[in-house]
């Protein structure tokens, strides 16, 4: 999700993981499979995989499951049955929504996602209908509590490492990179002793929109349903929650 601190959103998702541990094991394994598919099975050369493994361990996913997921993603266990699909659509008030899903049943997943859009005031669209509103970027989250340097020094360090933008939030920094530079920038920061709390390739909105009244309620419910779906890995939107949210 866009809006406010990305770290706040990530922490909210982590709280859900703690509350629904059994349900999310499959989703965590899928995240590892996806990261290994995209960047290889060596976590030291694939920061997204390294981060996915760390999240799985935080949720107490057994190590055997983690290693099996890495091998499935890297092809060591043969062909994988999961298919990665991107869905695009419009939420309440014309908001743009992109969904990254991993499924072994395309028709079932598409039908369920289409139902969510229809139920909460939106509609599932065609491929490309909203993707032009987003840019793919590498995203690194660094918590301020883990930093031993001031904001100016950190900003210069991140820019020297190859970051394209740094956004300061109340309790964290969001470091944006070109997608191809995510591993390189993360390696430089780690050499400087900077702990990275989260790393991923994210779709970030070029501009954001706000909603009010009923549309805001519907949008919040739509995002909640999508994020809780077993096959959905990530949800991106140009919706900016109100200050009350």
Image: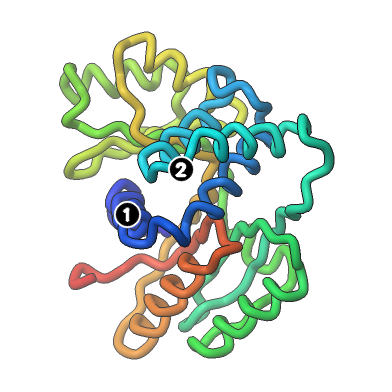
> Where is 54 relative to 94, above or below?
above
Q: Quadrant of the N terminus?
A: bottom left
Residue 196: x and y in percent read 35, 28
Q: Looking at the image, which residue is at 54% across and 40% down?
A: 201
Label 2 SS: loop
| x and y, in percent, of residue 164 in the image | 46, 30
**60 horizontally vs 72: left or right:** left
Relative to the observer, which residue lies in front, 10 or 155?
Answer: 10
Q: Let me know if residue 176 appears in the view.
A: no
Q: Dot 2, how many residues are within 10 Å of its Cα: few (below 14), some (14-19), or many (20+)? A: many
Q: Is residue 86 left or right of residue 53?
A: right
* Above or below, comparing residue 236 to residue 55 in the picture: below
Residue at the spot of label 2 = 61
Residue depicted at 55% across the width and 82% down the height: 116
Residue pictured at 23% horizontal, 70% vertical: 245
Element marked by disc 1:
helix
Picture disc at residue 220: none
Q: Which mark is residue 18?
A: 1
* Residue 161 x, y percent position in the rendering: 43, 16
Choose mark 2 or mark 1, whichever is in front. Answer: 2
Where is residue 197, by image quadrant?
A: top left
Near-viewer residue (202 or 157): 202
The mark that comes first in sequence, 2 or 1, is 1
Image quadrant where residue 45 sits: top right
* Residue 243 visible in the displayed image: yes
Q: Quadrant of residue 147?
A: top left
Q: Residue at x 16, y 30 (%)?
A: 145
Q: Answer whether labels 2 and 1 touch (C-beta < 8 Å).
A: no
């Amino acid at each position: 999700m866009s809006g406010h601190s990305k770290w706040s959103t990530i922490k909210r998702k982590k709280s859900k993981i703690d509350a629904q541990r059994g349900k999310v094991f499959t989703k965590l394994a899928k995240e590892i499979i996806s990261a290994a598919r995209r960047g290889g099975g060596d976590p030291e050369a694939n920061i997204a995989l390294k981060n996915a493994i760390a999240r799985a361990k935080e949720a107490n996913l057994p190590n055997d499951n983690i290693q099996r997921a890495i091998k499935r993603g890297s092809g060591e266990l043969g062909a994988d049955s999961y298919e990665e699909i991107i869905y695009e659509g419009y939420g309440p008030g014309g908001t743009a929504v992109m969904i990254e899903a991993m499924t072994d049943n395309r028709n079932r997943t598409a039908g369920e996602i289409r139902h969510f859009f229809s139920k909460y005031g939106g509609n599932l669209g065609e491929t490309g209908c909203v993707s032009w509103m987003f840019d793919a970027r590498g995203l690194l989250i660094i918590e301020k509590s883990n930093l031993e340097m001031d904001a100016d020094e950190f900003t210069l360090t991140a820019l020297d490492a190859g970051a394209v933008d740094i956004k300061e939030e109340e309790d964290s920094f969001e470091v944006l990179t070109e997608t191809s530079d995510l591993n390189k920038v993360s390696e430089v920061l780690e050499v400087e002793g900077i702990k990275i709390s989260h790393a991923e390739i994210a779709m970030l909105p070029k501009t954001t929109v706000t909603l009010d009244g009923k549309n805001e309620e519907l949008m919040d419910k739509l995002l909640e349903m999508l994020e809780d779906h077993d096959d959905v890995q990530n949800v991106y939107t140009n919706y900016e929650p109100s200050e009350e949210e």
